[in-house]
Image: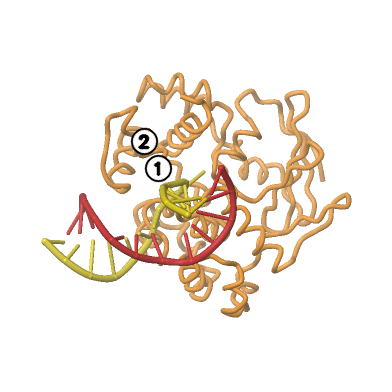
Chain colours: A orange, B yellow, C red
Amino acid sequence: MQGNIESQKTFSLEKTLHCGQVFRFYFKREKFFLPFLNSILILEEKDKKIFYSVSGDTLSESEIKKILGLNHNVDMINSYLVERSPVYKKIIEFSNGLRIMSLPPYEVAISFIFSIQSSIPVIKKRLNTLSEYIGSGTEIEGDKFYFFPKSRDLKNLSRKEISSFKLGFREKFFVEFIENYDETFFENLKQLDYEEKRKKLLRIKGVGEKVAQCILLFSLDELSAFPVDVWIKRGMKSLFNKIGTERKLAEEGRKIFGEYAGYAQEYMYYFLRFSGI
DNA sequence: CGCCAGGACAGCC
DNA sequence: GGCTGTCCTGGC
Protein backbone atom coordinates (compact mmCIF):
# COMPACT_ATOMS: atom_id res chain seq x y z
CA MET A 1 0.00 0.00 0.00
CA GLN A 2 1.14 3.56 -0.53
CA GLY A 3 0.01 7.13 -0.60
CA ASN A 4 0.91 10.58 0.57
CA ILE A 5 0.18 12.30 3.80
CA GLU A 6 -0.99 15.85 3.24
CA SER A 7 1.66 18.50 3.13
CA GLN A 8 1.92 19.94 6.59
CA LYS A 9 4.16 22.81 7.61
CA THR A 10 3.84 21.47 11.12
CA PHE A 11 5.47 18.11 10.45
CA SER A 12 9.18 17.41 10.12
CA LEU A 13 10.18 13.81 9.58
CA GLU A 14 13.77 14.73 10.30
CA LYS A 15 13.06 16.31 13.69
CA THR A 16 10.55 13.66 14.70
CA LEU A 17 13.03 10.85 14.11
CA HIS A 18 16.05 12.62 15.61
CA CYS A 19 14.73 13.91 18.90
CA GLY A 20 15.58 10.80 20.90
CA GLN A 21 12.20 9.11 21.08
CA VAL A 22 12.92 6.39 18.51
CA PHE A 23 16.25 4.67 17.95
CA ARG A 24 15.64 2.10 15.27
CA PHE A 25 15.17 3.52 11.81
CA TYR A 26 17.25 3.36 8.67
CA PHE A 27 18.04 6.04 6.12
CA LYS A 28 18.84 4.87 2.61
CA ARG A 29 18.45 6.45 -0.81
CA GLU A 30 16.75 9.55 0.65
CA LYS A 31 14.13 7.40 2.36
CA PHE A 32 13.50 6.59 6.00
CA PHE A 33 12.67 2.98 6.85
CA LEU A 34 10.92 2.67 10.19
CA PRO A 35 10.28 -0.80 11.63
CA PHE A 36 6.93 -1.01 13.41
CA LEU A 37 5.88 -4.45 14.72
CA ASN A 38 5.76 -6.65 11.59
CA SER A 39 5.85 -3.76 9.15
CA ILE A 40 8.42 -1.47 7.66
CA LEU A 41 7.08 2.03 7.20
CA ILE A 42 8.87 3.71 4.32
CA LEU A 43 8.78 7.50 4.40
CA GLU A 44 10.07 10.09 2.01
CA GLU A 45 9.84 13.86 2.14
CA LYS A 46 9.47 15.34 -1.35
CA ASP A 47 8.08 18.72 -2.42
CA LYS A 48 7.06 19.33 1.18
CA LYS A 49 4.89 16.25 1.12
CA ILE A 50 5.39 13.01 2.97
CA PHE A 51 5.07 9.96 0.76
CA TYR A 52 4.68 6.63 2.45
CA SER A 53 4.50 2.98 1.64
CA VAL A 54 4.35 -0.07 3.85
CA SER A 55 6.16 -3.36 3.54
CA GLY A 56 5.06 -6.37 5.59
CA ASP A 57 1.82 -6.21 7.56
CA THR A 58 -0.59 -3.56 6.32
CA LEU A 59 -0.96 -0.30 8.20
CA SER A 60 -3.90 1.99 7.54
CA GLU A 61 -3.38 5.69 6.95
CA SER A 62 -4.89 6.51 10.32
CA GLU A 63 -2.54 4.04 12.02
CA ILE A 64 0.41 5.65 10.27
CA LYS A 65 -0.75 9.10 11.35
CA LYS A 66 -1.03 7.93 14.92
CA ILE A 67 2.45 6.39 14.85
CA LEU A 68 3.90 9.68 13.61
CA GLY A 69 1.87 11.90 15.91
CA LEU A 70 0.01 13.45 12.99
CA ASN A 71 -3.24 13.10 14.91
CA HIS A 72 -2.04 15.78 17.34
CA ASN A 73 -3.31 19.31 16.89
CA VAL A 74 0.07 20.99 17.22
CA ASP A 75 -1.14 24.49 16.31
CA MET A 76 -3.36 24.34 19.36
CA ILE A 77 -0.65 22.67 21.46
CA ASN A 78 1.94 25.28 20.46
CA SER A 79 -0.20 28.25 21.39
CA TYR A 80 -1.14 26.47 24.61
CA LEU A 81 2.55 26.13 25.51
CA VAL A 82 3.45 29.72 24.60
CA GLU A 83 0.55 30.89 26.71
CA ARG A 84 1.97 28.95 29.66
CA SER A 85 5.49 30.21 29.09
CA PRO A 86 6.47 33.00 26.65
CA VAL A 87 10.00 31.57 26.39
CA TYR A 88 8.44 28.81 24.30
CA LYS A 89 7.99 31.18 21.37
CA LYS A 90 11.66 30.89 20.40
CA ILE A 91 11.88 27.22 21.42
CA ILE A 92 8.95 26.25 19.20
CA GLU A 93 10.24 28.42 16.39
CA PHE A 94 13.30 26.17 16.35
CA SER A 95 11.70 22.82 17.13
CA ASN A 96 8.42 23.16 15.26
CA GLY A 97 7.55 20.10 13.19
CA LEU A 98 8.62 17.64 15.83
CA ARG A 99 5.87 15.19 16.73
CA ILE A 100 5.48 12.84 19.64
CA MET A 101 5.22 9.35 18.20
CA SER A 102 3.14 6.40 19.40
CA LEU A 103 5.33 3.32 19.38
CA PRO A 104 4.95 -0.29 20.61
CA PRO A 105 5.31 -0.28 24.44
CA TYR A 106 7.27 -3.52 24.64
CA GLU A 107 9.92 -2.18 22.30
CA VAL A 108 9.96 1.24 23.96
CA ALA A 109 10.39 -0.29 27.41
CA ILE A 110 13.38 -2.36 26.31
CA SER A 111 14.82 0.54 24.32
CA PHE A 112 14.84 2.81 27.33
CA ILE A 113 16.17 0.12 29.66
CA PHE A 114 19.02 -0.11 27.14
CA SER A 115 19.33 3.69 27.17
CA ILE A 116 20.36 3.98 30.82
CA GLN A 117 23.54 6.01 31.03
CA SER A 118 24.18 5.62 27.31
CA SER A 119 24.50 7.76 24.21
CA ILE A 120 22.16 7.42 21.25
CA PRO A 121 24.64 5.65 18.91
CA VAL A 122 25.30 3.03 21.60
CA ILE A 123 21.58 2.50 22.28
CA LYS A 124 20.94 2.16 18.58
CA LYS A 125 23.72 -0.35 18.18
CA ARG A 126 22.46 -2.50 21.06
CA LEU A 127 18.91 -2.55 19.67
CA ASN A 128 20.08 -3.36 16.15
CA THR A 129 22.35 -6.12 17.40
CA LEU A 130 19.45 -7.67 19.26
CA SER A 131 17.05 -7.37 16.32
CA GLU A 132 19.57 -8.79 13.88
CA TYR A 133 20.41 -11.63 16.24
CA ILE A 134 16.79 -12.73 16.37
CA GLY A 135 16.81 -12.15 12.66
CA SER A 136 13.22 -11.63 11.63
CA GLY A 137 12.82 -8.96 9.00
CA THR A 138 12.18 -8.26 5.38
CA GLU A 139 14.16 -7.34 2.31
CA ILE A 140 13.33 -4.22 0.35
CA GLU A 141 15.14 -3.36 -2.88
CA GLY A 142 18.15 -5.41 -1.85
CA ASP A 143 18.41 -4.09 1.71
CA LYS A 144 17.49 -6.13 4.72
CA PHE A 145 15.50 -4.47 7.50
CA TYR A 146 14.90 -6.13 10.83
CA PHE A 147 11.79 -6.09 12.99
CA PHE A 148 12.08 -5.69 16.72
CA PRO A 149 11.99 -9.14 18.39
CA LYS A 150 8.78 -10.55 19.82
CA SER A 151 8.62 -11.35 23.52
CA ARG A 152 8.49 -15.10 22.87
CA ASP A 153 11.75 -14.92 20.91
CA LEU A 154 13.47 -13.06 23.72
CA LYS A 155 12.16 -15.50 26.33
CA ASN A 156 13.97 -18.28 24.49
CA LEU A 157 17.38 -16.63 24.72
CA SER A 158 19.95 -18.25 26.99
CA ARG A 159 21.95 -16.25 29.53
CA LYS A 160 25.03 -16.85 27.43
CA GLU A 161 23.40 -15.40 24.33
CA ILE A 162 22.19 -12.40 26.31
CA SER A 163 25.66 -11.82 27.73
CA SER A 164 27.00 -11.60 24.19
CA PHE A 165 25.02 -8.37 23.73
CA LYS A 166 27.29 -6.65 26.29
CA LEU A 167 24.59 -4.70 28.06
CA GLY A 168 26.70 -4.32 31.19
CA PHE A 169 24.75 -3.55 34.34
CA ARG A 170 21.60 -3.24 32.24
CA GLU A 171 21.71 -6.97 31.53
CA LYS A 172 20.02 -7.97 34.80
CA PHE A 173 17.20 -5.48 34.14
CA PHE A 174 16.73 -6.83 30.63
CA VAL A 175 16.75 -10.47 31.75
CA GLU A 176 14.20 -9.86 34.47
CA PHE A 177 11.98 -7.83 32.16
CA ILE A 178 11.79 -10.37 29.35
CA GLU A 179 11.42 -13.29 31.77
CA ASN A 180 8.55 -11.77 33.73
CA TYR A 181 6.83 -10.09 30.81
CA ASP A 182 3.41 -11.28 29.77
CA GLU A 183 1.57 -10.06 26.71
CA THR A 184 -1.31 -8.57 28.61
CA PHE A 185 0.81 -6.22 30.72
CA PHE A 186 0.68 -3.14 28.51
CA GLU A 187 -2.86 -3.83 27.30
CA ASN A 188 -4.00 -3.75 30.93
CA LEU A 189 -1.89 -0.68 31.57
CA LYS A 190 -3.64 1.24 28.82
CA GLN A 191 -6.90 1.05 30.76
CA LEU A 192 -5.42 2.84 33.77
CA ASP A 193 -4.94 6.53 34.44
CA TYR A 194 -1.63 8.33 34.33
CA GLU A 195 -0.59 7.88 37.95
CA GLU A 196 -1.53 4.19 38.07
CA LYS A 197 0.40 3.54 34.85
CA ARG A 198 3.40 5.37 36.23
CA LYS A 199 3.39 3.43 39.49
CA LYS A 200 3.15 0.07 37.74
CA LEU A 201 6.00 1.00 35.42
CA LEU A 202 8.19 2.07 38.34
CA ARG A 203 7.84 -1.43 39.81
CA ILE A 204 9.81 -2.83 36.88
CA LYS A 205 13.49 -3.25 37.77
CA GLY A 206 15.53 -0.82 35.70
CA VAL A 207 12.63 1.53 35.20
CA GLY A 208 13.14 4.69 37.22
CA GLU A 209 11.40 8.02 36.89
CA LYS A 210 12.96 9.03 33.59
CA VAL A 211 12.47 5.72 31.80
CA ALA A 212 8.90 5.45 33.09
CA GLN A 213 8.08 8.91 31.73
CA CYS A 214 9.56 7.95 28.35
CA ILE A 215 7.40 4.84 28.16
CA LEU A 216 4.33 6.86 29.12
CA LEU A 217 5.03 9.54 26.54
CA PHE A 218 6.25 7.56 23.54
CA SER A 219 4.10 4.45 23.77
CA LEU A 220 1.13 4.95 26.07
CA ASP A 221 -0.24 8.21 24.66
CA GLU A 222 0.31 10.14 27.87
CA LEU A 223 1.16 13.53 26.42
CA SER A 224 1.46 15.04 29.89
CA ALA A 225 4.50 12.89 30.75
CA PHE A 226 7.72 14.85 31.23
CA PRO A 227 10.93 12.77 31.10
CA VAL A 228 13.82 14.52 32.83
CA ASP A 229 17.26 13.70 31.49
CA VAL A 230 20.45 15.73 31.87
CA TRP A 231 19.42 18.13 29.11
CA ILE A 232 16.04 18.84 30.64
CA LYS A 233 17.67 19.14 34.05
CA ARG A 234 19.90 21.87 32.65
CA GLY A 235 17.00 23.46 30.79
CA MET A 236 14.72 23.58 33.80
CA LYS A 237 17.46 25.42 35.63
CA SER A 238 18.47 27.87 32.90
CA LEU A 239 14.95 28.57 31.61
CA PHE A 240 12.81 28.28 34.74
CA ASN A 241 15.32 28.41 37.60
CA LYS A 242 14.06 25.05 38.85
CA ILE A 243 16.37 22.50 40.42
CA GLY A 244 15.83 19.18 42.18
CA THR A 245 15.49 15.46 41.64
CA GLU A 246 14.14 13.97 38.42
CA ARG A 247 10.87 13.28 40.14
CA LYS A 248 10.48 16.84 41.40
CA LEU A 249 11.41 18.35 38.04
CA ALA A 250 8.97 16.03 36.25
CA GLU A 251 6.21 17.22 38.56
CA GLU A 252 7.34 20.80 38.02
CA GLY A 253 7.23 20.42 34.24
CA ARG A 254 3.82 18.81 34.37
CA LYS A 255 2.57 21.61 36.58
CA ILE A 256 3.77 24.32 34.21
CA PHE A 257 2.76 22.64 30.93
CA GLY A 258 -0.25 20.57 31.94
CA GLU A 259 -1.67 18.03 29.53
CA TYR A 260 0.93 18.79 26.84
CA ALA A 261 4.04 18.73 29.03
CA GLY A 262 5.43 15.98 26.80
CA TYR A 263 5.54 18.32 23.82
CA ALA A 264 7.15 20.98 26.01
CA GLN A 265 9.77 18.43 27.02
CA GLU A 266 10.61 17.26 23.49
CA TYR A 267 10.69 20.82 22.15
CA MET A 268 13.02 21.82 24.97
CA TYR A 269 15.27 18.83 24.40
CA TYR A 270 15.54 19.43 20.67
CA PHE A 271 16.17 23.14 21.22
CA LEU A 272 18.87 22.65 23.86
CA ARG A 273 20.55 19.91 21.92
CA PHE A 274 20.60 21.29 18.42
CA SER A 275 20.08 25.07 18.46
CA GLY A 276 23.66 25.67 19.61
CA ILE A 277 22.63 28.01 22.38
C1' DC B 1 45.22 7.37 28.52
C1' DG B 2 41.11 9.35 31.38
C1' DC B 3 36.54 10.85 31.33
C1' DC B 4 31.66 10.43 31.07
C1' DA B 5 27.35 9.68 28.48
C1' DG B 6 19.60 11.26 27.24
C1' DG B 7 19.97 6.68 35.06
C1' DA B 8 18.81 3.16 38.52
C1' DC B 9 19.56 1.23 42.76
C1' DA B 10 21.03 0.11 47.38
C1' DG B 11 22.56 1.96 51.50
C1' DC B 12 22.61 5.61 54.33
C1' DC B 13 20.67 9.36 56.88
C1' DG C 1 11.82 11.68 51.00
C1' DG C 2 17.02 13.43 49.40
C1' DC C 3 22.10 12.45 48.89
C1' DT C 4 26.12 9.41 47.65
C1' DG C 5 28.77 5.69 45.64
C1' DT C 6 28.63 2.22 42.32
C1' DC C 7 27.88 0.19 37.96
C1' DC C 8 29.35 -1.97 32.16
C1' DT C 9 30.52 -0.33 27.76
C1' DG C 10 31.83 2.45 23.83
C1' DG C 11 33.16 6.85 22.01
C1' DC C 12 35.99 10.70 22.22
A132 is higher (above) or lower (below) than A94 = below
Answer whether labels 2 and 1 touch (C-beta < 8 Å): yes
Q: Which mark is residue A230?
A: 1
Q: Which residue is mark 2?
A: A234
Q: Is residue A46 left or right of residue A124?
A: right
Q: Residues within 10 Å of mark 2 (few under 14, many from 20)?
A: some
Q: Position of residue A182 (x, y in %)?
A: 52, 72
C-alpha distance separating marks 2 and 1 = 6 Å
Q: Chain of mark 1?
A: A
Q: Residue at x 30, y 43 (%)?
A: A251
Closest to the observer, A44 or A239: A239
Q: Are marks 2 and 1 on the same chain?
A: yes
- Which amino acid type is shown beneath numbered disc 2? Arg
Mark 2 element type? helix
Q: Chain of mark 2?
A: A
C6 is higher (above) or lower (below) than A56 = below
A67 is higher (above) or lower (below) than C5 = above
Closest to the observer, A157 or A258: A157
